[in-house]
Image (spheres, rainbow, N blue to C red):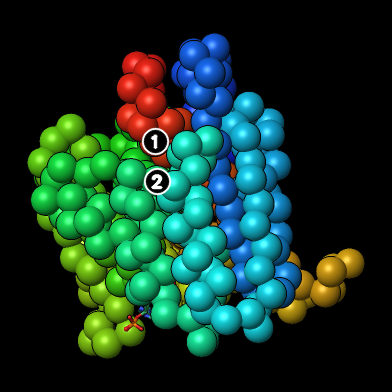
Amino acid sequence: MTDIIDGNAVATDVREGLGDAIETLSEAGHTPGLATVLMSDDPASETYVSMKQRDCEEVGIESHHVELDPDAPADELYDTVEDLNADDAIHGILVQMPVPDHVDTRRVLRSVRPEKDVDGFHPENVGRLVAGNERFKPCTPHGIQKLFDAYDVETEGAEAVVVGRSDIVGKPMANLFIQKAPFGNATTTVCHSRTKDLAAHTREADIVVAAAGVPGFVTGDMLEEGATVVDVGINRVDADTEKGYELVGDVEYESAEEVAGAITPVPGGVGPMTRAMLLWNTVKAASEQTGVDVTL
Ligand code: NDP
């Protein structure tokens, strides 16, 4: 029997689990606050930001939104981040990526105060994660860790293959896998577009995390019997639906499910966890910035 890992259910548990902490912070006069900054008219980015705002409202986090004209000078974005850094009501800042070409992405990531960097992308926070002394775990790998906890997926001594080496998913995922216990202790391989024989790696893996952005490219014949398969991919493919497209993962679900011991579906797997962990990181940020102790 293949376990279908229910990201919606685990994400609901995570969000409900934040309730007491948010109440404690609010009663102390420090309602957690998350600022989202959007400098794009890309419909997908607009959707992501509005989902994040809605998530905040649902759990009692104050959501502040700043929208900048994509053609505005880059300084407007840098100045906005500085203002949010200085605002005590804001505990987390999220600048929706990608930003326009005339904006220096690295400068934006560096300019968010590390204590408010709930995405975990500031170089200081990346360094701390690598050193095993993390402040914020990036939301997607953090969410995958929570799924593993919820479904008792053992990483200790496991062979883990991460397909993709992006700064937001692949690298931080691999960094979590190689940490010492409680989560980690996996022997970890990171594959990418220059990997010579991808299937030779995935066939040896107890855990495969697919984060390449290529629809359905991990197929059942690339997997070891009983492997845990985590599908991070969210890809729009043309389809005969009302919107004219559907969302599919990086894993070919039908063939992979026959072989896997556990698998995350798309949608309803990793996606809801990424959203939930942003809330979790924001509550952690609020607690640390205000000194109000909460249990997370
Ligand atoms: P990037 O495009 O930044 O990185 C993709 C990575 O996959 C790169 O390292 C690339 O290699 C590698 N890759 C691409 N094609 C292949 C291939 N054929 N074989 C092996 N490796 C390959 O993507 P992201 O990490 O940002 O996102 C990956 C996917 O996850 C996307 O579908 C995205 O939409 C989704 N996503 C989902 C989230 C969620 O919450 N579920 C959150 C974030 C992203 P190279 O470095 O050599 O180019």
Q: Which of 244 and 283 is in front in this view?
A: 283
Q: Residue at x 25, y 53 (%)?
A: 125
* Residue 77 drawn at (x, y percent): 53, 69
Residue identifier under label 2: 116
Q: Can residue 65 be seen in this view?
A: yes
Q: Above or below — where is 213 with respect to 81? A: below
Compared with 130, 97 (above or below) is below
Q: Is residue 178 above or below residue 150?
A: below
Front-lying residue, 127 or 184: 127
- Give the residue displayed 58% in from the left and 59% down from the top: 37
Q: In which quarter of the image is ligand 1?
A: bottom left
Check disc 1 and give the amino acid type. Ala
SS assignment at label 1 = helix
In three-dimensional space, the C-alpha distance between marks 2 and 1, rounded to whole angstroms, equals 6 Å
- Where residue 70 appears, as percent x and y from the top left, is 65, 78
Residue in the picture at 47% in, 37% down = 88
Q: Which of 160 and 292 is in front in this view?
A: 292
Mark 2 touching mark 1, by CB under 8 A? yes
Of marks 2 and 1, which one's residue comes earlier in the chain? 2
Q: Name the residue under label 1.
A: 285
Where is residue 63? Give x, y as percent: 63, 41
- Image spot of residue 57 (x, y percent): 68, 34
Q: Residue furthest right?
A: 242
In the picture, which quadrant includes the C terminus?
Answer: top left
